[in-house]
Amino acid sequence: MNAGGAIVPDRILSGAGSTAGAARGDRYGPDVDLRAWIDVRPCDDVRGLTAVARHPAVFDASSDDHCTDPEQVDMTPVVASAHMLALGIFAGGSLAGFFLLVRHSNVLTEIHTAILPYIRGRPAEFAAQRLLSYVFDRTPCQKLMTLVPASNRAAALFALRAGFKAQGTLTDSFLKGGLLHDQRIFGLSRADHLARRAATS
Protein backbone atom coordinates (compact mmCIF):
# COMPACT_ATOMS: atom_id res chain seq x y z
CA MET A 1 0.00 0.00 0.00
CA ASN A 2 2.16 2.78 -1.19
CA ALA A 3 1.26 5.69 1.00
CA GLY A 4 2.78 8.12 -1.43
CA GLY A 5 -0.02 7.45 -3.88
CA ALA A 6 -1.44 5.19 -6.53
CA ILE A 7 0.87 3.68 -9.10
CA VAL A 8 -0.94 4.85 -12.20
CA PRO A 9 -1.83 1.93 -14.52
CA ASP A 10 -0.74 2.35 -18.16
CA ARG A 11 -4.25 2.88 -19.50
CA ILE A 12 -5.27 5.67 -17.12
CA LEU A 13 -4.35 8.54 -19.42
CA SER A 14 -5.78 12.02 -20.23
CA GLY A 15 -8.66 13.73 -18.41
CA ALA A 16 -9.60 16.50 -16.03
CA GLY A 17 -10.20 17.09 -12.34
CA SER A 18 -9.62 19.43 -9.43
CA THR A 19 -9.16 19.10 -5.71
CA ALA A 20 -9.65 21.36 -2.70
CA GLY A 21 -7.27 21.73 0.21
CA ALA A 22 -8.14 21.02 3.83
CA ALA A 23 -6.62 21.04 7.28
CA ARG A 24 -4.35 18.17 8.28
CA GLY A 25 -6.19 15.29 9.88
CA ASP A 26 -3.92 15.21 12.92
CA ARG A 27 -4.82 18.77 13.93
CA TYR A 28 -8.02 17.37 15.43
CA GLY A 29 -6.02 15.70 18.19
CA PRO A 30 -5.88 12.19 19.61
CA ASP A 31 -9.49 12.27 20.79
CA VAL A 32 -11.01 12.73 17.32
CA ASP A 33 -13.67 10.12 16.53
CA LEU A 34 -12.24 8.63 13.36
CA ARG A 35 -15.19 6.24 13.13
CA ALA A 36 -17.42 9.22 12.41
CA TRP A 37 -14.91 11.26 10.38
CA ILE A 38 -13.38 8.62 8.08
CA ASP A 39 -15.43 6.47 5.72
CA VAL A 40 -14.26 4.06 3.00
CA ARG A 41 -16.74 3.09 0.31
CA PRO A 42 -16.97 2.45 -3.45
CA CYS A 43 -16.51 5.64 -5.42
CA ASP A 44 -17.30 6.36 -9.08
CA ASP A 45 -16.55 10.09 -8.93
CA VAL A 46 -14.18 10.27 -11.90
CA ARG A 47 -13.34 13.95 -11.40
CA GLY A 48 -12.63 13.51 -7.71
CA LEU A 49 -10.54 10.37 -8.16
CA THR A 50 -8.59 11.98 -10.98
CA ALA A 51 -7.93 15.06 -8.86
CA VAL A 52 -6.50 12.94 -6.07
CA ALA A 53 -4.28 11.00 -8.48
CA ARG A 54 -3.01 14.28 -9.96
CA HIS A 55 -2.23 15.90 -6.62
CA PRO A 56 1.52 16.66 -6.54
CA ALA A 57 2.09 14.78 -3.27
CA VAL A 58 0.43 11.70 -4.77
CA PHE A 59 1.66 11.89 -8.34
CA ASP A 60 5.29 12.68 -7.54
CA ALA A 61 5.67 9.72 -5.20
CA SER A 62 3.89 7.17 -7.35
CA SER A 63 4.28 7.91 -11.05
CA ASP A 64 6.99 6.30 -13.13
CA ASP A 65 8.65 7.31 -16.38
CA HIS A 66 5.68 6.04 -18.40
CA CYS A 67 3.55 8.91 -17.12
CA THR A 68 5.45 12.12 -16.40
CA ASP A 69 2.61 14.64 -16.76
CA PRO A 70 -0.19 14.62 -14.15
CA GLU A 71 -2.55 16.08 -16.75
CA GLN A 72 -2.38 12.71 -18.54
CA VAL A 73 -4.01 10.94 -15.62
CA ASP A 74 -7.69 10.08 -16.02
CA MET A 75 -9.51 7.60 -13.78
CA THR A 76 -12.38 7.00 -16.22
CA PRO A 77 -11.07 3.55 -17.30
CA VAL A 78 -10.82 2.49 -13.65
CA VAL A 79 -14.42 3.36 -12.90
CA ALA A 80 -15.54 1.55 -16.07
CA SER A 81 -13.44 -1.59 -15.50
CA ALA A 82 -14.97 -4.84 -14.28
CA HIS A 83 -11.60 -5.85 -12.78
CA MET A 84 -10.87 -2.71 -10.78
CA LEU A 85 -12.70 -1.02 -7.94
CA ALA A 86 -11.95 2.36 -6.42
CA LEU A 87 -12.77 2.65 -2.74
CA GLY A 88 -12.91 6.31 -1.84
CA ILE A 89 -11.49 7.55 1.45
CA PHE A 90 -13.84 10.23 2.72
CA ALA A 91 -12.86 12.60 5.53
CA GLY A 92 -15.81 14.53 6.88
CA GLY A 93 -17.66 13.73 3.67
CA SER A 94 -14.91 14.99 1.32
CA LEU A 95 -12.90 12.70 -0.92
CA ALA A 96 -9.38 12.64 0.57
CA GLY A 97 -7.89 9.62 -1.17
CA PHE A 98 -8.69 6.19 -2.53
CA PHE A 99 -7.65 2.56 -2.53
CA LEU A 100 -7.62 1.03 -5.99
CA LEU A 101 -8.33 -2.70 -5.95
CA VAL A 102 -7.10 -4.63 -8.98
CA ARG A 103 -8.43 -8.18 -9.09
CA HIS A 104 -5.91 -10.73 -10.35
CA SER A 105 -8.21 -13.68 -9.59
CA ASN A 106 -11.08 -14.51 -7.25
CA VAL A 107 -8.59 -14.99 -4.42
CA LEU A 108 -5.84 -12.44 -5.19
CA THR A 109 -6.28 -8.66 -5.23
CA GLU A 110 -3.61 -5.99 -5.63
CA ILE A 111 -3.92 -2.61 -3.92
CA HIS A 112 -2.74 0.81 -5.06
CA THR A 113 -3.08 3.67 -2.61
CA ALA A 114 -3.56 7.42 -3.08
CA ILE A 115 -3.80 9.51 0.07
CA LEU A 116 -3.80 13.30 0.27
CA PRO A 117 -1.31 14.74 2.78
CA TYR A 118 -3.85 16.12 5.24
CA ILE A 119 -5.14 12.68 6.27
CA ARG A 120 -1.81 10.86 6.40
CA GLY A 121 -1.01 9.39 9.79
CA ARG A 122 -3.76 8.12 12.10
CA PRO A 123 -6.66 8.88 9.73
CA ALA A 124 -5.00 6.99 6.88
CA GLU A 125 -4.18 4.05 9.12
CA PHE A 126 -7.81 3.93 10.25
CA ALA A 127 -8.90 4.05 6.60
CA ALA A 128 -6.61 1.10 5.87
CA GLN A 129 -8.40 -0.99 8.49
CA ARG A 130 -11.74 -0.02 6.93
CA LEU A 131 -10.36 -1.17 3.59
CA LEU A 132 -9.30 -4.54 4.99
CA SER A 133 -12.70 -5.08 6.57
CA TYR A 134 -14.38 -4.27 3.27
CA VAL A 135 -12.23 -6.68 1.26
CA PHE A 136 -12.22 -9.61 3.66
CA ASP A 137 -15.81 -9.26 4.87
CA ARG A 138 -17.48 -8.58 1.52
CA THR A 139 -15.41 -10.34 -1.16
CA PRO A 140 -13.98 -13.85 -1.68
CA CYS A 141 -10.43 -12.46 -1.70
CA GLN A 142 -7.97 -14.60 0.27
CA LYS A 143 -4.81 -12.58 -0.30
CA LEU A 144 -4.02 -8.90 -0.71
CA MET A 145 -0.75 -7.72 -2.20
CA THR A 146 0.91 -4.40 -2.94
CA LEU A 147 4.16 -3.37 -4.58
CA VAL A 148 6.21 -0.61 -2.97
CA PRO A 149 9.25 1.00 -4.60
CA ALA A 150 12.24 0.20 -2.41
CA SER A 151 12.98 3.91 -1.93
CA ASN A 152 9.50 4.65 -0.54
CA ARG A 153 10.05 3.94 3.15
CA ALA A 154 6.86 5.72 4.23
CA ALA A 155 4.77 3.44 2.03
CA ALA A 156 6.52 0.34 3.36
CA LEU A 157 5.86 1.44 6.96
CA PHE A 158 2.22 2.15 6.10
CA ALA A 159 1.82 -1.39 4.75
CA LEU A 160 3.50 -2.94 7.79
CA ARG A 161 1.36 -0.95 10.23
CA ALA A 162 -1.74 -2.15 8.39
CA GLY A 163 -0.69 -5.76 9.00
CA PHE A 164 1.01 -6.60 5.73
CA LYS A 165 4.20 -8.66 5.71
CA ALA A 166 7.23 -8.27 3.46
CA GLN A 167 7.20 -11.24 1.10
CA GLY A 168 9.99 -10.64 -1.36
CA THR A 169 11.47 -8.25 -3.88
CA LEU A 170 10.64 -7.70 -7.52
CA THR A 171 13.96 -6.51 -8.88
CA ASP A 172 14.41 -3.84 -11.56
CA SER A 173 10.65 -3.36 -11.95
CA PHE A 174 10.04 0.39 -11.44
CA LEU A 175 11.48 2.93 -13.88
CA LYS A 176 11.91 6.38 -12.35
CA GLY A 177 14.23 9.13 -13.55
CA GLY A 178 15.71 6.83 -16.16
CA LEU A 179 16.81 4.31 -13.53
CA LEU A 180 15.38 0.90 -12.71
CA HIS A 181 14.41 0.39 -9.06
CA ASP A 182 13.40 -2.69 -7.07
CA GLN A 183 9.91 -3.01 -5.61
CA ARG A 184 9.18 -4.75 -2.34
CA ILE A 185 6.25 -7.15 -2.28
CA PHE A 186 3.93 -6.93 0.73
CA GLY A 187 1.07 -9.35 1.34
CA LEU A 188 -1.73 -9.99 3.79
CA SER A 189 -3.87 -13.15 3.93
CA ARG A 190 -7.45 -13.32 5.06
CA ALA A 191 -6.43 -15.71 7.87
CA ASP A 192 -3.74 -13.35 9.16
CA HIS A 193 -6.08 -10.37 9.03
CA LEU A 194 -8.85 -12.16 10.92
CA ALA A 195 -6.39 -13.40 13.55
CA ARG A 196 -4.99 -9.89 14.00
CA ARG A 197 -8.47 -8.40 14.26
CA ALA A 198 -9.52 -10.98 16.85
CA ALA A 199 -6.39 -10.28 18.91
CA THR A 200 -7.08 -6.55 19.01
CA SER A 201 -10.85 -6.60 19.50
Image (cartoon, helix red, strand yellow):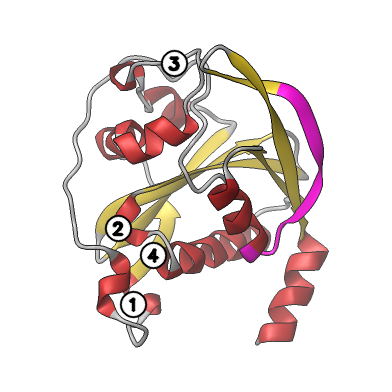
Q: Nearer the viewer, residue 99 or 77?
A: 99
Q: Nearer the viewer, residue 12 or 164?
A: 164
**Disc 1 from disc 4: Cα separation:** 8 Å
- The verdict on residue 147 being magenta is no
Residue type marked 4: Asp
**Disc 4 from disc 2: Cα separation:** 15 Å
Q: Is residue 162 visible?
A: no
> Which of the two discs, 4 and 2, sits closer to the camera?
2
State the quadrant of the C terminus. Answer: bottom right
Q: Which residues are magenta?
A: 161-172
Q: Tell me which numbered mark, 3 or 1, is placed earlier along the sequence.
A: 1
Under circle 3, the secondary element is loop
Q: Tell me which numbered mark, 2 or 3, is placed earlier along the sequence.
A: 3
Under circle 4, the secondary element is strand
Residue count near mark 4 (Cα–Cα under 10 Å), binned few <14, some 14–19, many ≥20: many
**Disc 3 from disc 1: Cα separation:** 36 Å
Marks 3/4 in contact by CB < 8 Å: the verdict is no
Which residue, given by chain and number where applicable, does mark 4 sit on?
39
Which secondary structure type mostly characterizes the magenta part of the structure?
Answer: strand
Which residue, given by chain and number where applicable, does mark 3 sit on?
67
Q: Tell me which numbered mark, 3 or 4, is placed earlier along the sequence.
A: 4
Which residue, given by chain and number where applicable, does mark 1 sit on?
36
Marks 1/4 in contact by CB < 8 Å: the verdict is no
Above or below, comparing residue 65 to residue 188 in the picture: above
Q: Position of residue 111 (x, y in %)?
A: 60, 43
- The verdict on residue 166 being magenta is yes
Which residue, given by chain and number where applicable, does mark 2 sit on?
118
Label for residue 145?
Answer: none
